[in-house]
Image (spheres, rainbow, N blue to C red):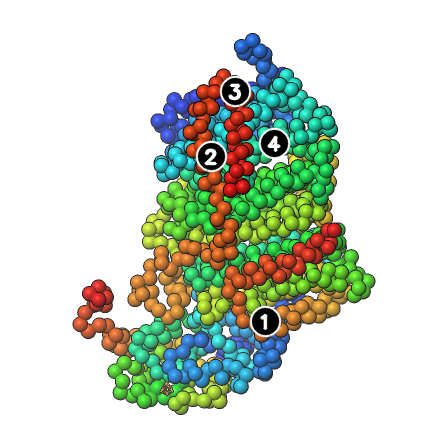
Amino acid sequence: MSEWDELVNYFRGRSMWMLHYCTGCGAIELPPTMTSRWDMERFGIIPMATPRQADILLITGYLSIKTLKRVVYTYEQMSAPKWVLGFGSCTINGGIYWDSYGVIQNLDKYIPVDLYIAGCMPRPEAILDAFGKLKKMVQKGEAKGYEKYIKNYDWYKANQDRVFRRTEPVLRKAEEVTKSA
Amino acid sequence: MIVLLKLIQGIGAGALSISIGLLFVGIGRKITARIHRRYGPPFVQNFIDLFKLLSKKSISHGFTFDLGLIAGFSALLAAVVFLPMGQINIFPHNSSLIMILYLMTMAYLGMAMGVSSSGNPNATVGIARALTLTMGYEVPFAAVIFSVYLFAHTGSLTNIVAAQSGGFMNWNLVKLPFGFVAAEIALQGMLGEAPFDMAIAPAEIASGPMVEMGGKYLGFGMLQHSIGLFLETGIMVDLFLGGGSNVWIFVIKQFELYFLALLVNAIFPRFKIEDGVSFMWKVPLLLGIVQALIVVL
Amino acid sequence: MNTNLIWLVAMPLIGSAVTAVVVRYKFLDRLITFLTFATTLFVLFLAHVGQSYSWTLKFLGTTLNLTLNVSHLSIFMLYISIAFGTVLAFYSLIDNSRMKGFLLLLVLAANNWIFMSNDMIGFFFAWELMGWASVVSVLGGREKEKSRHAALYYAMMSVAGSYSMLFGIFILWRLTGTFSISANIAYLSSIIGGHPWWVLGIVSLFFMTFMIKSGIFPFHTWVPLAYAYSPDAFTPFLSAAMSKYGVYGMLLFLPLGLLEKGFPTAFGVPWTNYIFLWFGVITAVVGTVLSIFQDDVKKLFAYSSLSNLGYVVAAIALFTPVGITAGIYHAFNHLLFEGALFITLLAVISRSGTSKLSEMGGLWKKMPITFFTFFVGIASAAGIPPFNGFGSKWLVYQAMIKQHLIFATILLFLASTGAFMYLFKAFHSIFLGQLSHDYERVKEVPIVGQIVEAFLMIAMIFFGVQPGYILKPIGAIVKSMGLKPLPVMANGYVAGMFSNVYMPLIGWSLVVSFIFGFILFYVSAEHKNVSQTDNYTAGQIPEDWGLTPETYQFSWNFYQPVEKLFVPFFRIKIDGFFRGIGDWTKATGSAIKEIFVGNAQMYAFFAIVGLIIFVIAGWMA
Ligand code: SF4
């Protein structure tokens, strides 16, 4: 890593903007993390409205297959240095949804996760701790999930397609259903 | 030789406005955090953010997208050099206030062109809101600046500043108090701070104009905001607070105005757009007209 | 005796006769039109200030003296209108709307005659020729039914105007026994001290005609219709050049409007002028506000055009040196940018086949030259320095502030901010946003059109940065009116009352900062271009959602919140009121004709009285 890259990484770690997009129960832990009690803005982390502006994608909990589709689309819309943070046991192994038909179990099979936070649900302290860890990883240049995604795109794509097939209607086409209704 | 000198001075003024503007926003974030009883980011956070944004990859929607964002930044930079800033006054014979205001319009036109060529309706809705609000605050502001014109018998900022020299009692703030209040409210709209921040509402229209901007585009947007902040507060200081004997006093006066705006911003919710405009056409406009009548009669 | 002046009128007439013969062959028709315009422009080079020509007609025992003469004002107007017409005629070579070349040439003949005529008979005849030729031109619009209706409405207003002028002419003739304009004006100014009301009445008759022609409130109702439904290639001339006849007429009679001797003053202007000024201000505001809500792009710019004429009228009504300068300067700028905008609209409409804003979008990639011309055009119209609209708007404000007219100034400022709103709306809806699938195969206009557009774009920048080329002739006009012209400064200066602006400096400042901006842009991290469908949609995938470019384009109900603000004002329907007059005229016209047959003066008088009664009745109701 050249000195310039080190400098760039140092500043990147100090200014990580997260996408304000919440999927599962984890959403409820973010407001306290943002506001007066824990105040994550002091680490330069602020919520942003769209994927174009954001650096971090938080997957705050379980992901239904339909939501996964949106998450993947959103992830692909984000620009290059981007990191994914998996919240809670649901993103690690399914958590209490380990045997659900409509929810994915391992997030890492579909998009590259840089860091997981264990717990159900992780408390704000844990979240802040994770942000600190991620910051160190970024500054050391270790968080390279987005490069992994491009390198192994075929594998990720195949995994995604396998679950997406499950969202298609089994019996009838969607239009037919709406027409007859 | 003189051309080269002016060029260097101009670049210096641009650099000053960018750094002061960024610093203001940084300090502003800290102050807002303290009002919220938070610790807040370091006050250089904005520089870090800017650096990160400029070094981040981004997407573009074509040449107009690029050009628009660049125009938004550059046209404001071009306007800054005409602003008298304390003892720095690069073109003293060319500081017509209306000229500066119209030149700033070019930046907003450029910005509007850029973001709406992205084809995202959220962006265009944001721009439409911003323009509607512009119609709201420009009217009281016009009343104020024309009162100042009449009062000082001059339209050039240099002369308006010169007319206020010689102590606090000569400031237009004291001489035209209604106008000052009206302009303060208009300034709140100009800066896009609450309660007039409907153009960049993050929850309803996904931050409006900024919806498709990422990386360096957002960086340019940030630069534009900083220079705009510098210019708008600078104009107010020249109009009402008597400019400054040197540039640092000038900056401190600017900060006072920004501080006021921040306090309001930190505690107010948002207006609905038409309510915002009709508010602008009621209270500040009335004050502005009262001031104008006092000056004329 | 300068016979070359005759050729200024005769040349277009001959050209129009020739084109009338070959009207079947479109290209030939357009070619001859263009050549005639070019020759007329050449003939104009031979004309100089102070030249005159007159001849005598024996008609039913009376002798009529017809005089042409060239003043500072007329040569300025002639240059700008013929030069613009030539550019337009060049563009029309590739145009395929149903504009007839011979009608345009008739208008040109009338144009030259109006600007040079120094006798009222010639003036009136030329005025009528212009009126009828343009009415017939309007008939050839894209939508037959609508353009017929628009032409009728326009004809009705023109006729009302003509009556009014005719009546004024006959009264003056009775009083002085001569038709010469300058003699009559001299007469009127000599009696102004004794009979101010008389003079006011006579001048108002003329002013009504001019206000109708320029579309000044409350006579603005024909403008949007006629502009929107006339042939696309004719509208630029209608808006840019023909709206100036009214301005010219006002300037001709305005020295009289300065009724200081007879009337008290308000804010340093005679109150007659003060009222007249408010007509201009109201036009500016009404035009702007109505423009914001239009969906038809030609209607939008029609309102925009008349709102700018409001500025002109407001400025010249002051009759101060800076006011007159500002007014004429803005008239010129209006000609340039409004002409350029209507020509780009012509290009866009010919390619996309629609004039509805809600049906267009994203055309900038397809028509880059048109796009940039339009961009410079709206920047000019919005008054952004260093483009050409800024100097005049700025002077208008200065002129108003000089007279302490603070309310009028604030309203004009409001109009200018509103102008930015509707201009951006048009800009976005035509060129930016999502490109519909229907326009995937749209191409840029042919090379002739591109040349014209590029030329106009350069002209707008050039006259913005170098206003001296226009301000100097205007200074001469102001001087010829007996006022003290603004100080003449170096070429790039716009000299105002309160401060000066050196336009090239702004230009250089922009150039330097743009270079800086581009450098910063290209040293920053790289970007990649994405398609228009790759857009933030809150995570929803466009294909799954059934999202099309048309549905993802925001152009319908663009300023809906503003609409809510203006709801109370929309209840006032001026248009319907004039329509009522139209019906009334139709019904009672024949009866009046029966009674007053053979007495043109009485006939005109009653038409006017009726109109005035109806105006009053309409406002009371
Ligand atoms: S890990 Fe627990 S808290 Fe988090 S989403 Fe799953 S069930 Fe909810």
Q: Amino acid at mark 2?
A: Ile
Q: Nearer the viewer, residue A158 or C104?
A: C104
Q: CB under 8 Å between callouts 3 and 4?
A: no
Question: In which quadrant of this rendering is ligand 1 seen?
Answer: bottom left
CA neighbours of label 2 inside 10 A, class few (<14), some (14 to 19), many (20+)? some
Which label was assigned to residue C581? 2
Whichever of callouts 4 and 2 sits on the residue coming sooner in the sequence is 4
Mark before the other along the chain sequence, 3 or 4:
4
The residue indicated by pointer 4 is C204
Question: How far apart are the alpha carbons under marks 2 and 1?
Answer: 55 Å
Q: Which residue is mark 1?
A: B265
Left or right: residue B129 versus residue B282 is: left
Query: Looking at the rendered structure, which numbered label has been put on residue C600?
Result: 3
Eyeballing the image, is A134 above or below C161? below
Label pair 1/3, CB-CB below 8 angstroms: no
Mark nearest the camera among 4 and 2 is 2
Mark 4 residue CB less than 8 A from any atom of ligand 1: no
* Chain letter belonging to callout 3: C
How far, Cα to Cα, is label 4 from label 2? 20 Å
Q: Chain of mark 1?
A: B
How far is mark 1 from mark 3, CA to CA? Answer: 70 Å
Q: Nearer the viewer, residue C75 or A97?
A: A97
Q: Circle 4 sits in a helix, a strand or a loop, which is it?
A: helix
Q: What's the residue at 43%, 89% (across, down)?
A: A122
Residue B253 visible: yes
Q: In the current view of this chain or complex, which residue is farthest to the bottom?
A: A119
Q: What label does residue C491 carry, if any?
A: none
